[in-house]
Image: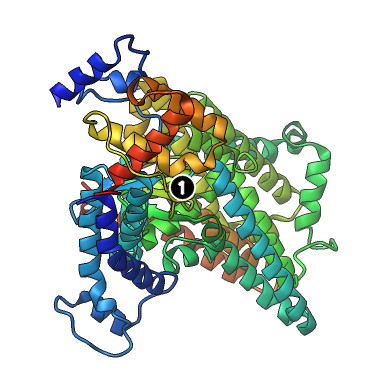
Amino acid sequence: MGGARAQIGQLQPPAPARPAAAQARPGAPIQRLDTERRVEAPEGVAVALRVAGPFPRLGAWLIDQGIRISVYGTIGGVLGLLGSFGEGIMSIIIFAIEWFYPVAFELRAGGRTPGKMALGLMVVQADGTPITPGASVLRNLLRFADFLPFAYLGGLLCMLSNADFARVGDLAAGTLVVWRDRPAPGARPSSAPPEPPPLPLLLHEQRAMMDFADRQASWSEARQLELASHLEPVLGGPPPTTLRRLLGVAAWLRGGGR
Amino acid sequence: MSQEQFEAKHTALWAEVERLLELLEGRALNAQEQQALGRLSPLREGGNHGLEQLPALYRRLCQHLALARHRGLSAPLQDRLNALALRGQVALYRRPGAGLRAAAHRLLVEVPQTVRAEAGLVLLAHALLYLPAAGVALMIWAEPAVVYDVLDPMQLASFEAMYDPHSDHYLRERAADDDTAMFGFYIRNNITVAYNCLGAGVLGGLGSAYMLVTNGLLLGAVGAHLAHVGCWTPFSSFVIGHGSWELTAIVLAGAAGLRLGLTLLAPRGRTRGAALRAEARGLLTLIYGFSTMLLIAAWFEAYWSSSASIDPTVKYAVGGGLWVLVYGWLLLTGRGEVPRGA
């Protein structure tokens, strides 16, 4: 592999400035600004958890709140016909729903209230295992602490002060709100004719090229050309040719033509 | 093996894992399914939809994820496998029942132990609440006009109206929905007071002390004044029931606030962040304890204390019993038990 590095160096004499991450020595820690958090699964693989930030969680909360309010409206309408007895029942139902709606859904539906389902979120323990009943009760009991002084401001400040976007209840219960699925990946890679790379590539270089091919359909053509043009010294130009060859190399790396 | 071959070879397995996960998610398992998942050797039975295969398939999938990472296969593929692995872990590693026991343990063992570990601050918080209350009550008993130094006349009039046996408002039997409306109101009100006691502790504990003293003054002034104008029985029989939970919860919130303030003020050689993290567990246990107590208090306040159909004698007896219960819980339960995670 050392030979491969030297070869790249020879091929591009007026080396354009490479990004710092690419220049890092192998094994040197790269400072990642990311919401990904890896936990070891018992099956011997590190599962990546992507913690969700305040905005998707606000959306989930709004949906849940809407559902609760419409449930109260419906039940209230029916029980209202029963007079004061109905009102008594109603009061108990409201109490139960206010307090146990999140707990019930988190425990029965895999850590997801309807709002979280709609946004593709779920609550898990910090080690990636399912949320336990105790943790669910605790994180929802402490909603009050997060709500204060008003409109979940305390919870928001708490979320912004730690890397896991944990509100007070999450910190106490050791839980995380994570994305359950990534949003569906974009279009499949282009059907460029595969061609072998002009020189041996390091693993992360292969990976970068394949990622580029996976995502290029979501960018404008000008942006594709601009990004591809960084590889002009290696793949040859002008940019449209570089782009075509880059996609070809990516297809080759993926296994096309072999 | 190239990525395309890898995908072609295993994509059926991944789809099968996804199908089984869809089947499992969003509901609790019935006994038969639990049994199927727990089996080591696949046993064909009707109605399981192949669930008995899931653990084995899931382990294969985890191996595929490890391979995909190691070989640097494309990001969408890794993400897809990762999402399935995470969902599989959540679906397979459920721990039925154990959590409720943990919640009870926290309440019956950890909360009292933490309170006793903080005995000094808890005593101080008691003093900060009850000494001003007793002091101002004595002063009003000696010189009733002092009450106007503590409360403004409007506030006082509304308190009098609430407890005056001859007033229209006095403890009428409310409809159940009013009780519940009051329940919601009490929870919000009490929680706000308690969390203010806690949050004000950020100011080196002085804020908590201030909140405790002002609440104590209010309590003492209202009590003494109502006794003076002849409304002692309605007031005391109203307060005694939920007071055990509510006042003690406020004391604990104040103690937690004092601890918070002391930690920030004197981090004892740690950085303030490290000191806070070290104290967080105890603080959160206290918060859990007093939040639960406030819930209980609000229930009593709305459905029990305000009920006019219950004789004051009964209210005194039950209220006294509740005070014994609360302090018995805090002082006696959980002695000799090992804290979890210790």
Residue B147 sits above or below residue B266 on the image: below
Which residue is pictured at 64% across the width and 64% down the height? A68
Query: Residue B248 at x, y = what percent?
Result: 49, 49
Between B280 and B17, the residue placed more toward the observer is: B17
Query: Residue B283 at x, y = what percent?
Result: 40, 40
Between A66 and B187, the residue placed more toward the observer is: A66
Between B335 and B37, the residue placed more toward the observer is: B37
Q: Is residue A78 left or right of residue B316?
A: right
Q: Residue B101 falls in which quadrant of the image?
A: bottom left
Give the residue at mark 1: A169
Between B31 and B101, the residue placed more toward the observer is: B31
Which chain letter matches label 1? A
Q: Is residue B175 visible?
A: yes
Residue B92 sits above or below residue B123 on the image: below
Which residue is pictured at 52% across the width and 67% down the height? B318
Amino acid identity at mark 1:
Gly
Query: Residue B315 at x, y = what percent?
Result: 59, 67
* Element at label 1: helix
